Image (cartoon, rainbow, N blue to C red):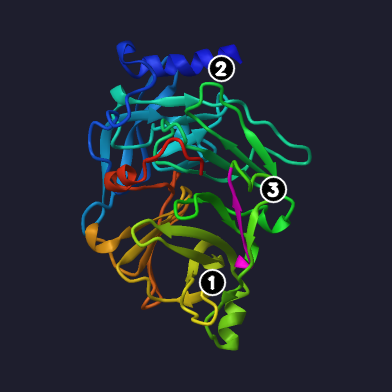
Amino acid sequence: MSSLLLSRLSRLCLRKPPALGVRHLVGARFLSETPLCHIYGAEHCGENWLEGDIGRLMITDFSGPSCWTRVLEKTVPMDMMAETGTMGASHGWVLTSKYGPYLSDDLNPGVSESDFSGIVLPDFETLPHCQTELVTNVAMSSSSPDDEDCILAVKFVGPQLSLCRPAEKNKKWVNIRIEDPAFFNSRVMYTKRDKKFAMPAYGGTHIGYWDLGENLEKPKLCRKGLYTPQLLQSEWEELDLCCTVEELVESRSTQEMFMIKRFRKRNNNKGGRMEEHQIWVFKQGLNRCNPLQWCYTNDIGDLCIFLSKSEPFCLKASSHQKCQNSIYFIDKSERGIFTLGGKCKTSNFSNFTAPYFIPPQSYLNANRSSNPSNSP
């Protein structure tokens, strides 16, 4: 363990002046504004004795009415661009496990190399009949793990959910075994409104809520089914050929929660690649008789949703020159926009090795923990 720690600390010293140290003052870390963007990859530019091959970070900038890809001066280890280079991301922080669990802002374009920061986490503890190699995703309760009350959640494929406070001196994992198999492949997110981590069960039949308090071992469950749109039998048959996944995303500006149901279909004419086929959005409050019912909607107003391998987020479209009532998505092979009103998709295909959307600086600033004494 000591050799792994030394390796990670050496990496920090290599990429920043020693006088700055590993940790930084809150609010002083960002040398430039983090744009709304997604990670495109890295352009190989050399190597060093510790990290091996390194490359200049490439991002696709979404901060204007159109997007454009640019190469930054900031360098990152090329192994972070491998398929298994990262485990997940949230708020511009990525979790890696090459030398053990490690949280860093390597891929945040708003953080320069001289201001680089990383947090060494305890080794994962695998519960009986669980595994800690494959991860569905990670989520954080605050946009910065430096916040005292920030909690990092790692959802592994299978029954295990692990929580940790990265800023604590004596860090430890709180490991939860989820009994309901409907959550084994679910993606976790943090809801500011409810101050809990939440996951939709398979099919969207119910939602589970977890925190480090009363809902640690026994999650709070909300059992409200989905009110789906009316479709022709042929349309249902086509959707039956798709793989589905449900995600939760919260609009912090309107305090609305949305459930997203994604349909992906294999295109055998294109080498069997998986493609986004349909995206449904559900929200509560549309049924006056049952306001907690999740009802299908094709109108989310002046909002746009960003889905990737990172924790999803929602922005006010007009404030960021984005398309209203739309969903922006990216995965390992496809990037596109799905317009809810017209039910149409525009996308392109490429190899996105680190398919993470990163929220803009205004979103990150607004989602810092404001009261360190309260637990989520």
For the magenta stretch, what is the residue range?
204-211
What is the C-alpha distance between the residues marked 3 and 1?
A: 28 Å
Q: Which of marks 3 and 1 is in front?
A: 1
Which residue occupies 29% across, 61% down?
A: 316
Question: Relative to residue 328, is residue 274 drawn left or right?
Answer: right
The answer to which of marks 3 and 1 sits earlier in the sequence is 3
Q: Position of residue 30 (x, y in %)?
A: 27, 32
Disc 1 residue type (three-letter)? Leu
Question: Where the N terminus falls, by quadrant?
Answer: top right
- Residue 317 visible (yes or no): yes
For the residue labelled by badge 2, is the local secondary structure a helix, a strand or a loop? Answer: helix
Which residue occupies 37% across, 15% down?
A: 14
For the residue labelled by badge 3, is the local secondary structure a helix, a strand or a loop? Answer: loop
- Read off the residue under disc 1: 292
Disc 3 residue type (three-letter)? Gly
Which residue occupies 43% across, 18% down?
A: 11
* Number of residues whose C-alpha sits closer than 10 Å to that of mark 3, classed few (under 14), some (14–19) or many (20 or more): many
Q: Nearer the viewer, residue 197 or 105?
A: 197
The answer to which of marks 2 and 1 sits earlier in the sequence is 2
Residue 326, placed above or below residue 361: below
Residue 355, placed above or below residue 251: above
- Read off the residue under disc 3: 158
Q: Which of 347 and 4 is in front in this view?
A: 4
Q: Which of marks 2 and 1 is in front?
A: 1
